[in-house]
Amino acid sequence: MRRAVSLAHKGEWPGGRFVAEVTLPFEERNQPRVEMTDDQGRVFMLDMEKAVRLNDGDGLVLEDGGVIRVAAALEAIADINCADAQELARFAWHLGNRHILVEVLDEGTLRIRDEAATIEILQGIGATITRYMAPFSPEAGAYSSSGGGQGYTHDH
């Protein structure tokens, strides 16, 4: 079985070594060791020493030097459009208080997963929401060694 043994960040791997692509949602882009199937249906083992955050355009380097390109899958997301810095801070605070994963976009927009309960809360405090399918790459968690924002404790 092919084994991906290291990560080459986007722009740091030679394009001529491209052998396949694997399209993954966010939750599957933060694992240390798991069997995966590339977009052509061929199985490979992601075999990293520890969990690494895989971003769109990164390359998984195989033992033979080939590279499998990582593509971020389209997911149901919701963009929160903020009128100004105060609104952005207010909505971000509410999301952080609920430990919601957030992607910070340009021009005062926050992106979250499209989850009905969270959308209802935000609309209740005046947020303008746009829902659609797009890649989701939230901010790395401050307490997460893999950068995925998972598995931290909230000790005070």
Image: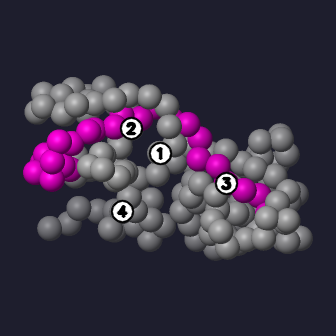
Q: CA distance from mark 4 to mark 1?
A: 14 Å
Label 3, label 1: how far apart the Cα atoms are: 13 Å
Circle nearer the N terminus (4, 1):
1
Q: Which numbered mark, 3 or 4, is in the foreground of this view?
A: 3
Q: Which mark is on residue 70?
A: 3
Labels 4 & 1 near each other (Cβ < 8 A): no
Q: Answer left or right for 105 relative to 9.
A: left
The answer to whether any part of residue 48 appears in the image is no
Task: State the residue position of label 2.
Answer: 113
Residue to which mark 4 is pinned = 141
The percent coordinates of residue 147 (x first, y second) are: 44, 65
Q: Residue 90 colored magenta?
A: yes
Alpha carbon separation for disc pair 2 and 1: 8 Å
- Answer whether labels 4 and 2 touch (C-beta < 8 Å): no
The answer to which of marks 2 and 3 sits earlier in the sequence is 3
Secondary structure at badge 3 equals: strand
Does residue 132 lie above or below 55 as drawn? above
Residue beneath the point at 35% across and 41% down: 112
* Mark 2 or mark 1: whose residue is earlier in sequence: 2
Badge 1 element: loop
Q: Residue at x 89, y 70 (%)?
A: 64
In the image, residue 47 sits, relative to residue 77, either above or below, namely below
Comparing marks 4 and 1, which lies closer to the viewer?
1
* Magenta range: 66-92
10 Å neighbourhood of mark 1: few (<14), some, or many (≥20)?
Answer: many
Position of 115 relative to 36 (above/below): above
Instruction: Give the quadrant of the C terminus.
Output: bottom left
- What amino acid does circle 1 point to? Phe
What is the spatial separation of the Cα atoms under label 3 and label 4, in whole angstroms? 21 Å
Q: Earlier in the sequence, mark 3 or mark 4?
A: 3
User: Which residue corresponds to mark 1?
Assistant: 136
Which badge, 4 or 2, is on the more N-terminal residue?
A: 2
